Image: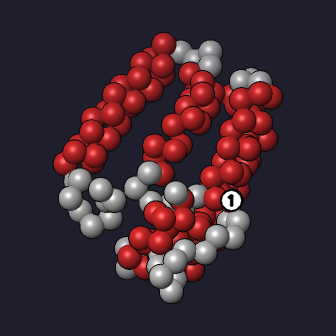
Amino acid sequence: TELSWRGFWMPQDGHAVFSPFEGWLSAMPYWAQLMGLPGWLGLVVLALLVLLFAAALIFGPGVRRLGPEIRLFAASYVLYLLAVFFPQSSTLRLLFPLAPLWGAVGWRRSWWLRGAVLLACIGLQALWIANVYGFANTFWRVP
């Protein structure tokens, strides 16, 4: 299934080719160039995101309080996505299993910070609905 989606975005002689991590390494320059940026910048952004995520899992005090099960699941799930997934319109949907990491934000914090996180999540939900239903016919949306 993943290769059929990838073939839509990056056709290679009529069929998509799979090799681990190739999806992200070919997609990031593609998306950067689509936004008018140099392709190498997409790879730099990917490397920074991976390093920041790893640092948060290892050194983040809030994340460490969540326990080794959540941290190991998050690390292995992100590694799986990096190895086999081609980033496209399903990326946000596939990141939902990482939602338990939000527990690090609300762990023993003041009531106003938890309220601010709740309001931010409600606002992001409104943006998500507008994005899914309002921009459904743009070219980068797969039907």
Res 71 visible: yes
Q: Residue at coordinates 40% horizontally, 55% vertically from top-left?
A: 89
> Relative to 99, is 2 above or below?
below
Residue 1: give x, y in percent of width and height: 52, 57
Amino acid tagged 1: Ala
Image point (47%, 76%), residue name: 10
Question: Of residues 22 and 70, which is closer to you in this image?
Answer: 22
Horizontal side of residue 109 vs 132, given as left or right: right
Quarter residue 101 falls in: top right
Q: Is residue 126 above or below residue 143?
A: above
Residue 63 x %, y %? 70, 31
Q: Position of residue 46 (x, y in %)?
A: 60, 64
Q: Judging from the image, what secondary structure is the residue with disc 1 in? A: helix
| Residue 29 visible in the current orientation | no
- Horizontally, residue 75 falls left or right of residue 102, namely right
Please determine whether, in this image, residue 115 is positioned above or below residue 35: above
Identify which residue, 62 or 4, lies in the foreground.
4
Check disc 1 and report the residue beneath it: 83
Closer-to-camera residue (42/17): 17
Task: Pick the quarter of the image with the C terminus.
Answer: bottom left
Corner quadrant of residue 9 = bottom left
Count residues near mark 1 (Cα–Cα under 10 Å), then give few for <14, some for 14-19, many for 20+. some
Q: Residue at x 79, y 41 (%)?
A: 58
Residue 37 pos. (x, y %): 43, 79
Q: Residue at x 38, y 76 (%)?
A: 34
